[in-house]
Image (cartoon, rainbow, N blue to C red):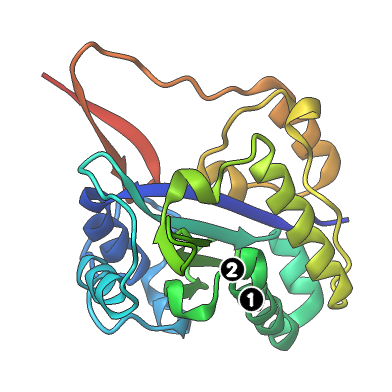
Amino acid sequence: MSYAIIRNAKYKRENLMAVYRHNERKNKNYSNKDIDRTKSHLNYSLKDPEFNYVKEFDKILKKYDLKGQIKTVSNIACEYMITSDNDFFKRIGEEETKRYFATAYKFVCEYKDLGEKYILSAKVHYDEKSPHLHLLFLPVVHTVDKKGNPIDKLACSEFWKAKDSYRQLQNAFFEYMVSNGFELQRGLPKEETDRVHYTLKEYKNITNYEQTKETLKNIKLELPQPSKNIEYRDMGTMEIKYLQF
């Protein structure tokens, strides 16, 4: 049986333009050979940004008077990559595939009472190996100020405050999708895979339970830790890299 897959990434302001160019297919060339530009016309949006992601973020921040301290090192946006394996989408067909992503979009709107207004962009890609949804959102928490007045606060660390935040996300997403009629199984927990983080490319290559279980048990992602570096994301492969100096 196929997996219900949802993966989260966090971005600083400096990352948003590169993510925008990749998700909205604004680049002329891609190092990711999985992208078939002849199929890019099949991609579609569940929510289109009015501007690029940086300007869209600023618009939402101002429009809803979001509170919270934003520093250069702050994570100001998150991205869910939502998918399953290619065989699953072939089996359920085009209309059910569209319903899968529409249902996932609704899940994000409802999860932690986020609200659709804080979704920055939602783009479904059909021009790679498996259909998948890139959904950018602002990690907003609904809380109160010192006087007890209700406020919306941009706070990534608070949005993911619980130690088992990602487990809660995986459980909630799986239960939501199954309750909406999709025959899926829950992704493997970290305790079983002994895995801290998976790259976007690895998620896209997941095909079945046994293969995934065996692969993820034996692969670990280790990032270099140079004394001085600039972290950036290769938007062709979606891998984190470092520019040393």
Q: Nearer the viewer, residue 99 or 172?
A: 172
- Identify the residue under disc 2: 131
- What is the number of the mark on residue 89? none
Q: Is residue 132 visible?
A: yes
Q: Residue at x 45, y 73 (%)?
A: 119
For the C terminus, the image quarter is top left
Q: Is residue 141 visible?
A: no
CB under 8 Å between callouts 1 and 2?
yes
Q: Nearer the viewer, residue 223 or 116?
A: 116
| Apparent side of residue 220 relative to residue 10 in the rendered image (left or right) | right
**Looking at the picture, how far across and down is residue 217, in whole percent?**
74, 24
Mark 1 or 2: the one toward you: 1
| Residue furthest top in the image | 227
| Apparent side of residue 110 relative to residue 69 in the rendered image (left or right) | right
**Looking at the picture, how far across and down is residue 65, in whole percent?**
31, 73
- Identify the residue under disc 1: 101
Q: Nearer the viewer, residue 154 or 129?
A: 154
Vertical order, 121 against 241 (above or below)? below
**Looking at the picture, how far across and down is residue 175, in whole percent?**
84, 62
